[in-house]
Image (cartoon, rainbow, N blue to C red):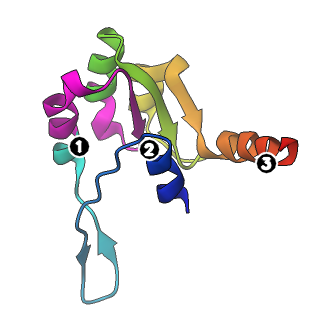
């Protein structure tokens, strides 16, 4: 439902293949691909929303912020995210739990 709602509202979602190990764990290594895709599509979007808690994206966040192309960094886990993101995007950070509250309010208002 979340993905459909985002797409309905104009977001373009890119899904990446994940690896499943024999022990059942799942690994999705998309860091370099996301950074590259953000730069390939640079002229196609006004502002980027980066969803991550991974400090590997701090360089992308810094660059997009410098170029005024960063809307926000949306962090899934408020209790566990990289200090590199804190430094690189400070005032652009937002958290999933904040959105849940906003969406619940919007839903009640309708």
Q: Position of residue 29 (x, y in %)?
A: 23, 58
From this view, report whether residue 17 is shown above or below residue 79: below
Q: Which residue is mark 1?
A: 34
Front residue (pair 22, 37): 37
- Please give the range of residues in magenta: 35-59
- Badge 2 marks a residue whose secondary structure is loop
Q: CA distance from mark 3 to mark 2?
A: 27 Å
Query: Which mark is first along the chain, 2 or 3?
Result: 2
Which labelled disc corresponds to residue 107?
3
Instruction: Determine the residue positioned at 54% across, 18% down.
Output: 91
Which labelled disc corresponds to residue 53?
2
Q: Position of residue 102 (x, y in %)?
A: 73, 39
- Badge 1 marks a residue whose secondary structure is helix
Instruction: Determine the residue positioned at 30% across, 35% down.
Output: 57
- Residue 50: name its quadrant: top left
**Side of 24 where 108 appears, left or right:** right
Instruction: Determine the residue positioned at 32% across, 74% down.
Output: 26
The verdict on residue 54 being magenta is: yes
- Badge 3 marks a residue whose secondary structure is helix
- Residue 12: name its quadrant: top left
- For disc 2, the neighbor class at 10 Å (few under 14, some 14 to 19, many from 20) is many
Query: Which mark is first along the chain, 1 or 3?
Result: 1
């Amino acid at each position: 439902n979340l993905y459909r709602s985002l797409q309905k509202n104009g977001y373009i979602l890119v899904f990446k293949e994940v690896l499943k190990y024999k022990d059942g764990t799942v690994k999705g290594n998309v860091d370099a691909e996301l950074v590259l895709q953000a730069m390939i599509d640079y002229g196609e979007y006004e502002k980027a929303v980066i969803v991550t808690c991974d400090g590997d994206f701090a360089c992308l966040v810094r660059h997009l912020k410098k170029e005024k192309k960063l809307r926000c960094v949306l962090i899934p886990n408020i209790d566990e995210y990289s200090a590199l993101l804190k430094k690189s995007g400070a005032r652009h950070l937002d958290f999933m739990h904040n959105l849940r509250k906003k969406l619940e309010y919007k839903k009640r208002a309708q």
